[in-house]
Image (cartoon, rainbow, N blue to C red):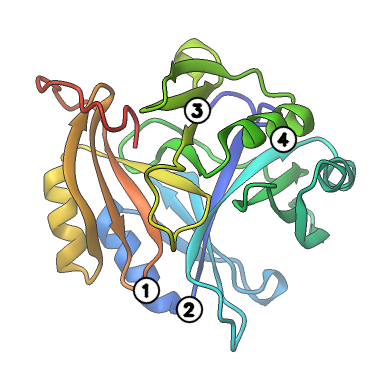
Amino acid sequence: MPIPANRMGEPCWADLMTSDLPRAREFYTRLFGWTASDSGSEYGNYVTFQKGDVDVAGMGAQEPGSTLPDAWTTYLAVTDADATVATARAAAAQVLAEPMQVGTMGRMAILMDPTGAPFGVWQADEFTGFGAFGEVGTPVWHELNTRDYSAALDFYTRVFGWTPAVLSDTDDFRYSTIGEGDDMVAGVFDAAGHLPDSVPSHWQLYVGVPDVHAAAATVTQLGGTVIREPWTAEFGTFSLVTDPTGALFVLGSVDEPNDAEPDADLPIG
């Protein structure tokens, strides 16, 4: 379905910073049937992935000598990137990249929330973000896995005006969703008791596929890694995977029958 109009404070884009552009380009185009277009030197040869004729994700190269892991970044839509960064800084966020103009496309910044999860903000000019959402080959969900659930909800509510809806609130499973009704687009998971010690809070991208088991097998064939074999939960079938250089993302079922019992471990991821 077409994504709702660029709603402020909610995910509007995701891009990959990779240490191997050619390899990542081959992996994602083959896995999801995406096409890839290079923006040229004016925009640092940033790559835009498309599914059909709509933009679905982006990709850029890591800086030479970077020690940062390859990773996907979720961007939240804002009306004023500079003002948002100031508000976020006052709410204990770290600014990883100060607001910068991206030609005529828009203005961006990269932050780290108070629980340690990096994310971006995007102030749209000519480019508004995703052209579709919730379909095969497009993002279907965004999820914040946080080590400090209360602090995360407080931060995003204060800075981005979120009104979280509680899905579950028990010691075993604590989760809130963002968005209304059928337009829910993101979730916040209390991952303190689930993440390995070496894994910090992070935003996680879900991409839709018609058959998660088949897609997970293709990930392996293309040089990626299946971190968690496909599992079925209340909202579909999922698999946590990485691309060939280690960037994490989740395969999520679209239009796939779900006859199994929900997995009490995670309702979304």
Residue topped by disc 2: 19
Q: Nearer the viewer, mark 1 or mark 4?
A: 4
Quarter location, residue 44: bottom right
Q: Amino acid at mark 3?
A: Val
Residue at image point 60% right, 87% down? 64
Residue 245, labelled with which disc? 1
Vertical arrangement, residue 68 with respect to residue 87, above or below: below
Q: State how far apart marks 3 and 4 are (Cα).
A: 18 Å
Q: Residues within 10 Å of mark 2 (few under 14, many from 20)?
A: many
Q: How busy is the neighbourhood of tag 4: few (under 14 within 10 Å), some, or many (20 plus)? A: many
The numbered dot on residue 185 is 3
The image shows residue 256 at horizontal and vertical percentages of 17, 27
For the residue pair 250 and 108, the one nearer the viewer reads as 250
Q: Earlier in the sequence, mark 2 or mark 1?
A: 2
Would residue 170 appear left or right of 263 to someone viewing this image?
right
- Residue 108 in view (yes/no): no
Q: Is residue 48 above or below residue 159?
A: below
- Comes first in the chain, label 3 or label 4: 4
* Residue 178, x across and y down, in percent: 55, 23
In space, the residues marked 3 and 1 are separated at their CA atoms by 27 Å
Which numbered disc flags the more N-terminal residue, 1 or 4? 4
Location of residue 173 by image quarter: top left
Pointers 3 and 2 in contact (CB under 8 A)? Answer: no
One can see residue 170 in this view: yes
